[in-house]
Image: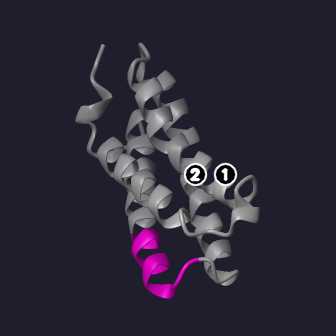
Amino acid sequence: MQDFRELVVWQKAHALTLAVYGATQGFPPDERFGLTSQLRRAAASMPSNLAEGRCRATDKDFARFVGIALGSAAEVDYFLLLARDLRMLDAETYNTLNGHVDEVKKMLSASHTRLKGGG
């Protein structure tokens, strides 16, 4: 079994998740079960799917989990945009988090391509 903590993409996704949790602490209380929950769950889904997939026996299995993490990254991307447009996130926080999401998405995409035998 390989340690997921060694994956640089997992490390970056985990750091992003921690940042999302911090940024959402200031969201309105009435969003606790709405946008706050959805954004946090989507963020946590990225590193958790990488952790689960890393323990799989084949690259094909792992690629499936990387693909799920990539989908979650796209959700985070949208939810951050929505939070910015609803003025729950200021522009600076949005830009910082969005930059991290873009980096994680690129890494996940490259990993997914490699694991599926495309690069």
Q: For the residue marked with disc 2, what is the amino acid?
A: Arg
Occupied quadrant, residue 54 = top left
Q: Which residues are magenta?
A: 89-99
Q: Position of residue 37 (x, y in %)?
A: 66, 51
Residue 40 in the figure: left or right of residue 112: right
Q: Which sits in the foreground, 24 or 117? A: 24
Compared to residue 107, the image places residue 67 above or below, namely above
Q: Would residue 116 be visible to someone looking at this image?
A: no
Compared to residue 98, the image places residue 109 above or below, namely above
Compared to residue 28, the image places residue 105 above or below, namely above
Give yes or no for contact between labels 2 and 1 (Cβ–Cβ under 8 Å): yes
Q: Position of residue 88 (x, y in %)?
A: 62, 77
* Chief SS of the magenta region: helix
Q: Position of residue 31 (x, y in %)?
A: 73, 62
Look at mark 1 in the image and give the residue it sits on: 37
> What SS does tag 2 mark?
helix
The residue lying furthest to the left in this view is 6
Q: Which mark is residue 40?
A: 2
Residue 75 in the figure: left or right of residue 58: right
Q: Residue at 38% of width from left, 40% of height from top?
A: 114
